[in-house]
Image (cartoon, coloured by chain):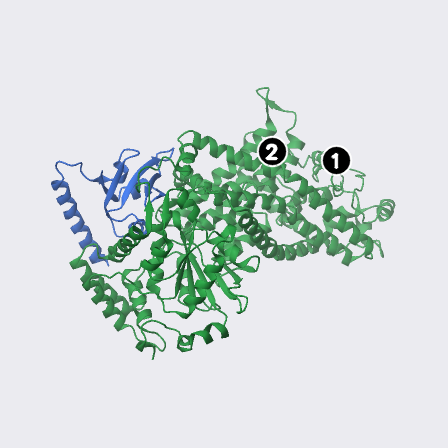
Chain colours: A green, B blue
């Protein structure tokens, strides 16, 4: 029946208009170019009533909110589509957006109305997406943003005239000042009851003939009308990908061949016609004082770019921005990090006091609270990084950073857009990995994710600090350079060098792809909207805590179990302790009990010590340490270090606290600096079974090299799992990094010995 | 698709040679990256038929559109151009596919 009516395609359209809007929740989709002000408008329309998730099976963010169009009507569902320039390219974002609009995404209803967000300062290119929305044949409303800015740039847009020419409502909005939002809602409600706009431009007769032929050959299914069949024909004939079904494919190829005979540039035809139509529309509706492409020297963006992308100043500014970000992360973040650390310590003590001594208290305090606290302690850093990334993105600086560094990044086959994510990975790989979402090409994005954890993150610093404090202090090179600083720098450079190599290899092998094109908009500089920034940080941080948190909790409990079981008998029989100690010492140990907080280091370095150490040695982790000793011995590590390596898989910095337990120093007190002097002494004095020192400077370097390269961070693994939507990539990452770390440590230690160190 | 692409390329070469020979008195067409920094021009055509050519045209780089070569990045690549009132960064290899008529 629907073929009788020209346009409306859904069955509900046959109902009387009033009944339609009153009886059902409207579904509205919001589409627009990146940087068109979509997020700000979405936030203004929905307030905090929104949820962020992923589309099933892909990592494209799915944002949905509730929009009260009219207090007397049920609120509408507002779906924020990913920002895109067109529907033709084969990126995941664009495919998802198209599938949402055509109602092909499971769990998402086909939208009743589409709100196209159009940036008034960039009207022609923004309208290109609108022409494709018109072709889709759904009711359409344009929300015209940045009108004030366009006028400041001496461009005046007659919204009424624009609306008349387009054939559907155009509503100017200033989202931050809530101007035009009611008008937009009213226009949407009206559009829901009206017919979809009609395409006003035509293709050549030959092209139309081919389209009709393809539209006709598609088997008409129930409910599909001429419009959907025409859309399918358009997509197949002019799209990037050929249809997979062989008959259809042959038909499309034949049609393309025929078109190519008459017009060698046949594939450009729809593009050209759309832009030609846009030009006639804008000619009618836009008044500008400044003639259009020249005279750009006066606008603020061009002025700022004279410095920001300048040959010399540009690089200086980039360097200063990097410096500011790192300085902030490493200085400002320490206060809240200490607060969280102390908070979890205090919480642990409270729980310990309230609960009867035993397994449950141990599980809660040492497993759950310590594990989750150990990860949440990085939240301030992660939040600050998200803050900077969001600010840099929303001001438009991110595109400039990509512009400045693209040539460098291309050297290893990566995109300029990989620069910032990799840079933030020096503080923490997690926000870095989440920031790779701006990289369009999936293979480039994967390659960037795979090398991000090689950047020396802040969690490695405690390890470097301990090793250097124990073996390399007080030494100076050339009288003023401290060895410690040089070693830390060498570790950072090692990570970068290996990352470059890995990226190069990945791009040549499993992630092989032609050098990614760079066709990137340099958006005008804008003052970020504080609410949008806060909301972005909030949703990212929430995703981190929620997704990583669950995995981290599970692994924390497993690790706790590994160091706890089998139990050392402390209360009933004295078996466990007596195995290790002479009766007198065992008695003393029993009296000090399991209290590990700030336990004095009785006999530093010996095999005899407090219960915590004995427990660890006989636990599964301790046994595993002995088990892997033959494997790690060539790296210069003994079984105690093996325990450290095992426990630090969860998070690198736990190495320090594990060593504290292994070497019987006791867990550092809250607020006490990790790697305190007692631990340093313990490490220096530790002996192997034969009495030789367990640690030498060479072993320390080997250990640091291992920590540079190994992926010992369950949060990273969890986030890579989330971002790639499979276990394949995180497991691959852990495996290749472990292999690299092993080989590099092996070369360091054995090579060092050959050269006479150690 | 392969066939049509080959035809496109042959025809393109032909039209290119034609424009070359016709351009006598006015400044000849050149690729965008050959413009002096700051110079304006009009797009004559976009070479190639792949995803990059399509993306460029979707972004508004279509025949007849005025463009301006704004600057090159510090390391000489990518380039920044101005088209339809906004700024676009593209690599030199992409700019070479855009043939322009200098103003």
- Lateral position of residue A321 relative to residue A372, left or right: left
Secondary structure found at label 1: helix
| Residue A740 appears in view | no
Dot 1 crowding, Cα within 10 Å, few <14, some 14–19, many 20+: some
Point out which mark residue A499 bears: none
Q: In which quarter of the image is residue A247?
A: bottom left
| Image point (81%, 39%), residue name | A602
x, y percent for residue A623: 68, 51
Q: Quadrant of residue A689?
A: top right
x, y percent for residue B55: 32, 51
Residues beneath discs 1 and 2 located on the same chain: yes
x, y percent for residue A165: 31, 58
Residue position for label 2: A698
- Please tell me which residue lies in front, A414 or A657: A414
A515 in relation to A554, above or below: above
Q: How many labels does the image show?
A: 2
Q: How far apart are marks 1 and 2 (CA)?
A: 21 Å
Secondary structure found at label 2: helix
- Please tell me which residue lies in front, A365 or A322: A322
Point out which mark residue A678 bears: 1
| Image point (39%, 49%), residue name | A120
- Please tell me which residue lies in front, A127 or A742: A127
Q: Quadrant of the N terminus of chain A?
A: bottom left
Q: Going from the N terminus, do you reach mark 1 or mark 2 first?
A: 1
Give the chain of mark 2: A
- Lateral position of residue A433 relative to residue A636, left or right: left
Q: In which quarter of the image is the C terminus of chain A?
A: top right
Q: Do the residues labelled 1 and 2 touch (CB within 8 Å)?
A: no
Dot 2 crowding, Cα within 10 Å, few <14, some 14–19, many 20+: many
Give the chain of mark 1: A
A53 in relation to A626, above or below: below
A329 in relation to A550, above or below: above
């Amino acid at each position: 029946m629907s073929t009788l009516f020209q346009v409306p395609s859904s069955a509900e359209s046959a109902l009387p208009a009033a009944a339609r809007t009153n009886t059902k929740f409207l579904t509205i989709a919001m589409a627009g170019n990146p940087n068109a002000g979509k997020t700000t408008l979405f936030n203004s329309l929905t307030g905090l009533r929104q949820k962020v998730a992923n589309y099933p099976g892909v990592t494209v963010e799915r944002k949905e909110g509730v929009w009260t169009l009219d207090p007397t009507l049920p609120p509408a569902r507002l779906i924020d589509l990913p920002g895109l320039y067109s529907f033709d390219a084969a990126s995941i974002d664009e495919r998802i957006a198209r599938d949402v609009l055509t109602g092909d995404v499971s769990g998402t209803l086909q939208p009743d109305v589409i709100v196209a967000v159009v940036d008034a300062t960039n009207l022609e290119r923004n309208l290109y997406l609108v022409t494709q929305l018109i072709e889709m044949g759904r009711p359409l409303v344009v929300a015209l943003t940045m009108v004030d800015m366009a006028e400041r740039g001496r461009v005046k847009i007659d919204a009424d005239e624009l609306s008349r020419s387009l054939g559907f409502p155009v509503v100017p909005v200033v989202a931050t000042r809530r101007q035009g939002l009611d008008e937009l809602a009213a226009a949407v409600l009206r559009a829901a009851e009206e017919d979809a706009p009609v395409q006003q431009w035509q293709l050549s007769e030959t092209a139309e003939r081919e389209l009709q032929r393809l539209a006709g050959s598609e088997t008409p299914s129930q409910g599909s009308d001429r419009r959907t069949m025409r859309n399918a024909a358009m997509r197949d004939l002019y799209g990037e990908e050929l249809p997979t079904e062989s008959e259809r494919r042959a038909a499309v190829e034949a049609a393309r061949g025929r078109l190519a005979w008459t017009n060698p540039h046949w594939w450009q035809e729809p593009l050209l016609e759309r832009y030609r139509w846009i030009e006639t529309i804008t000619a009618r509706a836009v008044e500008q004082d400044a003639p259009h492409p020249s005279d750009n020297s006066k606008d603020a963006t061009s002025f700022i770019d004279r410095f920001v992308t300048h040959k010399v100043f540009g690089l200086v500014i980039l360097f200063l921005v990097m410096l500011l970000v790192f300085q902030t992360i490493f200085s400002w973040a320490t206060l809240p990090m200490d607060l969280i650390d102390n908070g979890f310590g205090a919480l642990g003590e409270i729980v310990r006091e309230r609960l009867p001594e035993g397994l449950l208290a141990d599980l809660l305090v040492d497993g759950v609270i310590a594990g989750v606290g150990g990860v949440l302690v990085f939240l301030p850093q992660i939040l600050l990084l998200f803050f900077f990334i969001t600010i840099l993105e929303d001001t438009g600086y991110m595109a400039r950073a990509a512009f400045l560094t693209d040539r460098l990044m291309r050297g290893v086959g990566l995109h300029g857009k990989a620069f910032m994510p990799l840079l933030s990975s020096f503080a923490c790989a997690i926000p870095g990995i989440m920031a790779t979402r701006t990289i369009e090409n999936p293979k480039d994005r994967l390659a960037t994710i795979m090398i991000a954890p090689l950047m020396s993150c802040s969690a490695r610093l405690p390890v470097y600090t301990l090793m250097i404090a124990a073996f390399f202090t007080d030494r100076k090179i050339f009288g003023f350079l401290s060895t410690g600083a040089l070693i830390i720098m060498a570790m950072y450079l090692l990570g970068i060098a290996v990352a470059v190599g890995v990226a190069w290899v990945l791009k040549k092998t499993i992630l092989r792809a032609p050098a990614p094109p760079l066709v990137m908009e340099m958006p005008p500089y804008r003052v970020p909207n504080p609410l949008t920034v806060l909301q972005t940080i909030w949703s990212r941080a929430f995703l981190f805590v929620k997704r990583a948190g669950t995995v981290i909790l599970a692994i924390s409990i497993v690790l706790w179990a590994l160091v706890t079981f089998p139990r050392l008998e402390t209360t009933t029989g004295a078996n466990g302790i007596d195995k290790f100690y002479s009766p007198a010492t065992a008695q003393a140990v029993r009296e000090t009990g399991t209290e590990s907080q700030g336990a004095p280091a009785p006999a530093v370095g010996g095999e005899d010590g407090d219960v915590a150490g004995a427990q660890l040695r006989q636990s599964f982790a301790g046994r595993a340490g002995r088990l892997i000793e033959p494997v790690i011995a060539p790296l210069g590590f003994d079984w105690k270090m093996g325990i450290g390596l095992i426990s630090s898989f969860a998070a690198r910095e736990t190495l320090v606290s594990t060593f504290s337990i292994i070497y019987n120093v006791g867990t550092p007190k809250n607020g006490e600096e990790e790697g305190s002097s007692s631990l340093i002494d313990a490490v220096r004095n530790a002996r192997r079974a034969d009495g030789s020192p367990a640690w030498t400077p060479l072993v320390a370097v080997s250990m640091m090299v291992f920590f540079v390269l190994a992926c010992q961070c369950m949060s990273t693994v969890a986030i890579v799992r989330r971002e790639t939507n499979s276990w394949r990539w995180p497991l691959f990452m852990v495996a290749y990094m472990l292999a690299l770390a092993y080989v590099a440590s092996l070369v360091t230690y054995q090579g060092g010995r050959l050269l006479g160190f150690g | 698709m392969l066939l049509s692409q080959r035809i496109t390329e042959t025809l393109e070469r032909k039209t290119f040679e034609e424009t070359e020979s016709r351009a006598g008195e006015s400044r000849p067409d050149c690729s965008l990256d050959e413009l002096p920094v700051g110079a304006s021009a009009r797009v004559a055509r976009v070479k190639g038929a792949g995803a990059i050519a399509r993306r460029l045209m979707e972004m508004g780089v279509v025949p007849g559109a005025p463009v301006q070569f704004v600057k090159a990045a510090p390391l000489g690549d990518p380039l920044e151009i101005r088209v339809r009132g906004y700024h676009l960064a593209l690599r030199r290899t992409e700019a070479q596919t855009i043939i322009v008529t200098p103003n």
